[in-house]
Amino acid sequence: MCGHGPGGHHGRCDCRGARMEGFLQPCLLLLLYEKPTHGYELMESMNRLGLWEGVPDAGAVYRHLRRLEEEGLVRSHWSTVGPGPARRRYEITPEGIDYLHDWAVTIRRNKAALDTFLRRYEAIFGQDKDMEKGN
């Protein structure tokens, strides 16, 4: 809990949906399955997915990419294709594809639980409660 109450929400409150970092890993894997690319382009693609307000935090993206590479789920190499300096290009590995499938199972399970929660919530408060609060 963020400790909000009469004073409102404070900082990066989980109940405002600000914390999507845990969802970063499957998004990166999915995007890399679709197209091997470099970090900046991954951030632009994630922004187009509409799951974040604005561009995802670059530091978090690169930390996740580094961790995924350490775990053998992605690999990278330096690319000199195109203008400008060399850039690290990432691609998903076969192990990463298996892990992406596991993520899909987990996301489906969580989606079912979230759908159940929202049905119960909406039965009590109605569907437009979040609109009344200006969200």
Image (spheres, grey):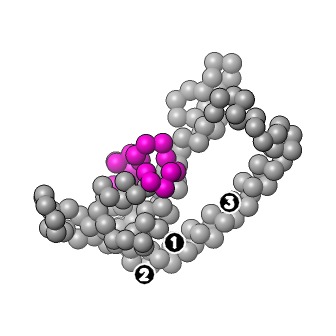
Q: Position of residue 73 (x, y in %)?
A: 41, 72
- Residue named by callout 3: 110
Residue located farthest toward the bottom when viewing the structure as drawn = 94
* Left or right position of 113 against 19: right
Inter-mark Cα distance, 3 to 2: 25 Å
Of mark 1 and mark 2, the one earlier in the sequence is 2
Magenta-span inclusion, residue 41: no
Instruction: Give the crowd class for mark 1: few <14, some 14-19, many >=20 residues within 10 Å.
Output: many
Q: Position of residue 124 (x, y in %)?
A: 86, 40
Q: Which residues are magenta?
A: 47-62
Q: Could you tell me which quadrant the N terminus lies in?
A: top right
Inter-mark Cα distance, 3 to 1: 15 Å
- Asked if the residue under mark 1 is in contact with the one under mark 3, i.e. CB atoms within 8 Å, the reply is no
Q: Position of residue 121 (x, y in %)?
A: 81, 43
Q: Which mark is residue 94?
A: 2
Answer yes or no: is residue 107 visible.
Answer: yes
Foreground residue, 48 or 78? 48
- Residue named by callout 1: 100
The amino acid beneath tag 3 is Asn
Of mark 3 and mark 2, the one earlier in the sequence is 2
Q: Which mark is residue 85?
A: none
| Element carrying mark 2 | helix
Q: Residue at x 33, y 55 (%)?
A: 62
Vertical placement of residue 108 versus 51, above or below: below
Q: Position of residue 61 (x, y in %)?
A: 38, 53
Instruction: Give the crowd class for mark 2: few <14, some 14-19, many >=20 residues within 10 Å.
Output: few
Instruction: Give the crowd class for mark 3: few <14, some 14-19, many >=20 residues within 10 Å.
Output: few
